Image (cartoon, helix red, strand yellow):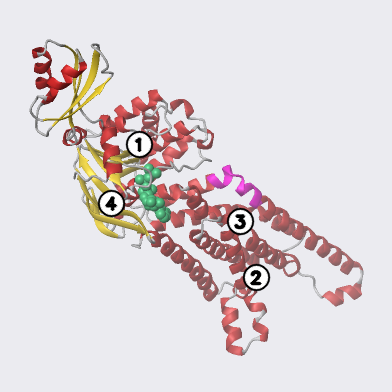
Amino acid sequence: MIEVEHLTKTYGEARGINDISFQVEKGEILGFLGPNGAGKTTTMRILTCFMPATSGTARVAGYDVFEDSLNVRRRIGYLPETVPLYTDMLVPVYLRYVAGLKELPYREIKGKVAKIMEQVGLTHKADKFIGELSKGYRQRVGLAQALINDPDVLILDEPTIGLDPKQIIEIRSLIRGLGKDRTIILSSHILPEVSMICGRVAIIDEGRIKAIDTPESLTEKLRVANKVKAVIEGVAEDVKAALGRIAGVNNILVENGDGVDRAKYTVEFAEGINGPPLVARTAIEGKWDLHELTPMRMSLEDIFIQIVTEEKDIV
Amino acid sequence: MRNFLFILLKEVRSYINSSVAFVVVTIFSVLTGYYFYNIFASFSTISFQAQTDPTMATQYGALNVTEFVIRPFFGIISVVMLIMLPMLTMRSFSEEKKTGTMELLLTFPVRDGEAIMGKFGGCMAIFFLMLTLSFPSILLVELFGDPEWGVIITGYFGLILMGGGFIALGIFMSSITENQIVAAVLSFAALLILYMLNFTAGAAGETMSAVLNYLSFTYHYRNFAKGVIDTSDVIYYLLFTLFFIFLSMRSLESKRWRG
Ligand SMILES: Nc1ncnc2c1ncn2[C@@H]1O[C@H](COP(=O)(O)OP(=O)(O)OP(=O)(O)O)[C@@H](O)[C@H]1O
Ligand SMILES: [Mg+2]
């Protein structure tokens, strides 16, 4: 549905994005994750035909964004980051205007506007000018205009920013529902949100894609630091010595281990070793009580920070 | 065509909601109305005196209300248009750029031409309202005198053509900057130069003066003011309008050029 190849955009001297390639299939939700100035908005602006790339190609719904922009624009819904709206228009009047420009049949416009306002929780703001709305409600109007023509492709730049928690949950489930038979790209700084909604995540930094995969396998791939956390009750020195005798243990960290009381051990294994059973066996053999045993996984947050700060490439 | 109408309606609504339309139309009516009142009043005084004083009658000849009132009235309308129409056109694209709404407009399935013609049509609608409000003055003349309706009709026709040119130029200026003041000043300056070209024509050489005359707005209006529609004048105004609409299209398009 979306095919991006070697996309590069330069702003004068500055690099907006640098040789970005990825694909998104129908029914897939791709999340853009990246620090400020990474190039998320730039990529979206190229995909929505707002501005051309310096080089590279992008195809949306089978049409080239540069050569065939009108056909691309017919099939997308776009929520820009700044949610630019006409402040001097009434909410339903604005939505009817957008519906008209998006080529909805004239007879359907009114009904469709009412339906979409219901969906994003705007019905009780029908007699307000957009300029009178709070940030969160403007965000909803922005979402409504993006969704109004039931587009095949949705491009949402930070869609849940500024919404209240209840609305965030509703909009997330709305997006997830839409994602079943559509193609969606969204950007976000909220990592749990991305791992919750998106089937795949692209981590972008300094204009490049650093990693692109499902949230699970990103987590999987990065469990390189193969660690097990265990809380064991026993003489810390004995426990530590016993753990140290396990083959494949690289490092042991002891916290709160100054007596016979329980202490927390972080045991780092070599790659490919399944640590938890080994730790459990050691505890039982030493007749110590094992209170907790957790294989340490990296959260998306850890991955994000690791990729972005350590310049690590795991594509 | 559909998109054109949607944008046109939205533009008219914005002009009305933002009270730009109210301010521009009111000032236009006050200025032209005040001038009309003056010329009409002095015309009545003179013609009244002429009826009683035979020496005056010979001095002014047969007093013609078309000559003394209608023609100067159209003249002043065109001058006020030159000042007020840039105020109308300055926001058309500049405001969209400044507030960022251009980002959505350009990603809707709207052709550049439809967006420009929609804006153009919106301004024309407000401009028609302005002209309509000048019409009661003409009726007043009809009530007290006997103006030539041929001149009135061609006069309005010429003003509409001229206004179309002013608006197209203003929209182009607005498409090249995101600053409304800059857009207004540029349009005003450009219109003023075109308006005054034939004032300097007298001093220039023969060919030069013909060129200056041909380019000038005022020069092409003089036939309309006499009740004559000359196709070359109509073509001049239409070409002028098309030229600036074409430039506006290029200006919008240039955002989609690779760079
Ligand atoms: N109009 C512009 N002119 C010049 N440079 C720009 C322009 N827009 C973006 N940039 C630069 O391009 C780079 C990418 O910006 P972009 O807006 O795509 O980042 P982003 O990932 O969306 O960031 P954020 O999370 O803050 O929204 C930044 O370095 C930015 O300074
Ligand atoms: Mg951004």
Numbered label attached to residue A71: 4
State which quarter of the image contains the C terminus of chain A. Answer: top left
Q: Which residue is drawn at 38% across and 61% down?
A: A13
Q: Determine which residue is flagged by label 1.
A: A189
The answer to whether mark 1 is within 8 Å of ligand 1 is yes
Q: Determine which residue is flagged by label 2.
A: B225
Quadrant hosting residue A255: top left
Of all chains, the one bearing label 3 is B
Please tell me whether residue B199 belongs to the stretch shown in magenta.
Answer: no
Write the start and end of the magenta stretch as one range: B14-25
State which quarter of the image contains the N terminus of chain A. Answer: top left
Q: Residue at x 91, y 75 (%)?
A: B55
Q: Is the C-beta separation of discs 3 and 2 under 8 Å?
A: no
Residue B7's place in the image compared with A273, above or below, is below
Q: Is mark 1 on a helix, strand or loop?
A: loop
* Distance Cα–Cα, label 4 vs label 2: 48 Å
The answer to whether mark 2 is within 8 Å of ligand 1 is no
Of all chains, the one bearing label 4 is A
Q: Where is residue B75 in the image (x, y as percent from the top left)?
A: 68, 67
* Distance Cα–Cα, label 4 vs label 1: 31 Å
Q: What element carries label 4?
A: helix
Disc 2 packing (10 Å; few <14; some 14–19; many ≥20): many
Is residue A229 or residue B212 the one in the foreground? A229
Numbered label attached to residue B87: 3
Residue B107's place in the image compared with A108, above or below, is below
Q: Main secondary structure of the magenta part?
A: helix
The amino acid type found where label 1 is placed reads His
Relative to residue A170, is residue B61 drawn left or right?
right
